């Protein structure tokens, strides 16, 4: 079966045919850099990372653009409220661009740890003000926008296709909009392309309409089309951005060019906690830095890939521990194979059909990037390999090498789990939490007996394995130290 992907635009799975036969042009909405990334971000960017990796595995050249939002994203995600960066920078007493730089670095640190491949181009909104102004001028000249008191708004009722992605009618949109008494907008569904800067507003640029700053949606239209062309293949993002953000992107881009903007719209679902969305504004989020203190980035990545990108994923410590065990099994199999390969030069064939496993992997991934099914196939292979190794008849080195290569490409490279690629995400920190509890309680006994030398030996030994013990009143807690600390 050739690759099919679920296109939000048609609400169906469609065969994948890029606009150019061997080049895939892809854009994903990047983070708004005003805080540390959380598990919800990890789900989104790991999902699209695997999509990019898989397309490259299939032989496509992929040009992957992911922006950094550092201006214009207001606190209510629409046209009201304060700029998220300006607000946070006031709390943290720094310049908004200092804040943006700090959290951009923090974002890439987290993504690097998760083995997320960096985008080929990572444009910043504040670096593309000229392009955004030009696009707004085009929309004005096409009578799809209007100026009001130094701000510019998109004229939604003048654009017939508005609502085609989210499938909302103008009446439905009205019903969800607050009635603003003193609004400059002609219609409640109109959205800001450019906002007038009030006195004292730090983030401001000159424009034909006076000093101001761009609306949030216009940056993605301007920057995606600058680097990928007026029409490109894949646009990805979180499901929560389908409306209004992506709907507005389509209106701006297609309104300005008169051409189809994006062929395939892909949306990842969210991470939930006790069934509720995880989000910064909801106060129930777990930052990646906190998650990494408890679980390795490899385990977090594996946890995310064990559910489909379009499914919700419920966070719990038990689920993460389960993922740690699952990943540990694959890592152990790999280690068994490597040890056997180091010991033997001759042997008999095991009967494992790697081609069958390869086809199963392709079938899973070709069905809208079904990573949980692909992982289930890897577990099947892992079981067969361990059974073969346990039989007592040695396997030929050649076969062991082929199995190793299979794990390294499919699990290591395509799913990005690092296994066998020399970029192990898991092995150095794969310590069983139950075993760790046993060491901690042993150490507590030794300390009660005042056997300080032995208790220190346990502490230092665990530190060498990347585990720090912290003695507190209520007992001893542990956390992992990440590499480089
Ligand atoms: Zn965007």
Image (cartoon, rainbow, N blue to C red):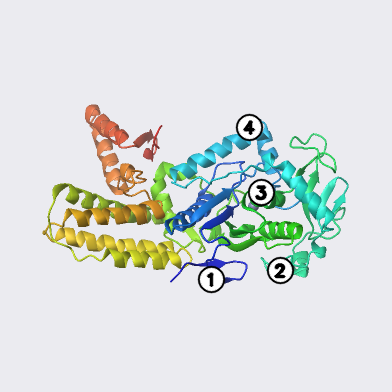
| Residue 158: % across, % down | 82, 64
User: Which is closer to the viewer, label 2 or label 1?
Assistant: 1
Q: What separation in Å lies between label 2 and label 3 (alpha carbons)?
A: 28 Å
User: Which is closer to the viewer, label 1 or label 3?
Assistant: 3
User: Secondary structure beneath disc 1?
Assistant: strand
Dividing the picture into quarters, in which one does residue 37 lie?
top right
Residue projecting furthest to the front = 21
Q: In this rendered view, identify the residue nearer to me: 165 or 235.
A: 235
Q: What separation in Å lies between label 1 and label 4 (alpha carbons)?
A: 43 Å
**Residue 13 - label:** 1
Residues under numbered marks 4 and 3 in contact, where contact means CB atoms less than 8 Å apart? no
Please say if 202 is above or below 138: above
Residues under numbered marks 2 and 4 in contact, where contact means CB atoms less than 8 Å apart? no
Precedes in sequence: disc 2 or disc 1: 1
Precedes in sequence: disc 2 or disc 3: 2
Residue at the spot of label 4: 98
Asked whether the viewer can see residue 40, the reply is: no
Q: What separation in Å lies between label 2 and label 4 (alpha carbons)?
A: 39 Å
Which part of the image, by quadrant, shows the C terminus?
top left
Precedes in sequence: disc 1 or disc 3: 1
Precedes in sequence: disc 1 or disc 4: 1
Number of labels in the image equals: 4
Precedes in sequence: disc 2 or disc 4: 4
**Residue 168 - label:** 2
User: Neighbour class for label 1 at 10 Å: few (<14), some, many (≥20)?
Assistant: some
Task: Give me the residue at 47% from left, 47% from top.
Answer: 117
User: Secondary structure beneath disc 4?
Assistant: helix
Residue at the spot of label 3: 226
Which part of the image, by quadrant, shows the N terminus?
bottom left
User: Neighbour class for label 3 at 10 Å: few (<14), some, many (≥20)?
Assistant: few
């Amino acid at each position: 079966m050739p690759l099919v992907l679920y296109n939000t635009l048609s609400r169906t799975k469609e065969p994948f045919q890029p606009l150019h036969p061997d080049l895939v042009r892809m854009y994903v909405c990047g983070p708004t850099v005003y805080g540390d990334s959380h598990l919800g971000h990890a789900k989104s960017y790991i999902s699209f990372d695997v999509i990019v990796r898989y397309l490259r595995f299939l032989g496509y050249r992929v040009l992957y653009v992911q922006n950094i939002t550092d201006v214009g994203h207001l606190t209510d995600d629409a046209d009201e409220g304060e700029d998220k960066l300006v607000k946070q920078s006031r709390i943290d007493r720094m310049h908004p661009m200092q804040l943006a730089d700090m959290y951009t670095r923090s974002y890439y640190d987290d993504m690097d740890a998760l083995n997320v491949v960096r985008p080929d181009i990572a444009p910043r909104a504040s670096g593309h003000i000229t392009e955004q102004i030009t696009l707004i001028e085009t929309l004005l000249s096409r009578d799809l926008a209007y100026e009001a008191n130094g701000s510019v708004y998109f004229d939604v009722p003048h654009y017939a296709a508005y609502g085609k992605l989210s499938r909302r009618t103008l009446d439905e949109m009205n019903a969800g909009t607050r009635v603003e008494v003193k609004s400059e907008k002609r219609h409640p569904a109109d959205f800001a392309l450019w906002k007038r800067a009030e006195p004292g507003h730090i983030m401001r640029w000159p424009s034909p309409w006076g000093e101001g700053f761009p609306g949030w949606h216009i940056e993605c239209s301007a920057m995606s089309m600058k680097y990928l062309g007026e029409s490109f293949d894949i646009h990805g993002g979180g499901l929560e951005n389908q409306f209004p953000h992506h709907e507005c992107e389509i209106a701006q881009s297609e309104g300005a060019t008169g051409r189809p903007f994006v062929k395939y719209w892909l949306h990842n679902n969210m991470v939930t906690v006790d069934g509720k969305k995880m989000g910064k504004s909801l106060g129930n989020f777990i930052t990646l830095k906190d998650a990494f203190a408890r679980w390795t980035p490899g385990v977090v990545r594996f946890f995310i890939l064990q559910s489909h990108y379009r499914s919700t994923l419920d966070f719990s410590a038990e689920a993460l521990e389960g993922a740690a065990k699952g990943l540990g099994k694959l890592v152990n199999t790999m280690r068994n194979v490597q040890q056997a390969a180091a010991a033997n030069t001759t042997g008999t064939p095991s009967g494992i059909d790697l081609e069958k496993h390869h086809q199963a992997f392709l079938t899973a991934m070709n069905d809208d990037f079904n990573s949980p099914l692909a992982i289930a196939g890897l577990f099947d292979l892992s079981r067969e390999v361990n059974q073969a190794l346990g039989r007592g008849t040695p396997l030929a080195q050649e076969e062991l090498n082929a199995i190793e290569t299979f794990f390294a490409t499919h699990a290591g490279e395509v799913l990005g789990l690092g296994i066998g690629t020399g970029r192990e995400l898991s092995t150095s920190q794969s310590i069983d939490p139950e075993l760790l509890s046993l060491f901690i309680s042993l150490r507590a006994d030794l300390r009660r007996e005042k056997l300080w030398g032995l208790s220190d030996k346990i502490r230092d030994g665990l530190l060498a394995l990347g585990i720090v013990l912290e003695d507190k009143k209520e007992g001893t807690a542990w956390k992992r130290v990440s590499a480089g600390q």
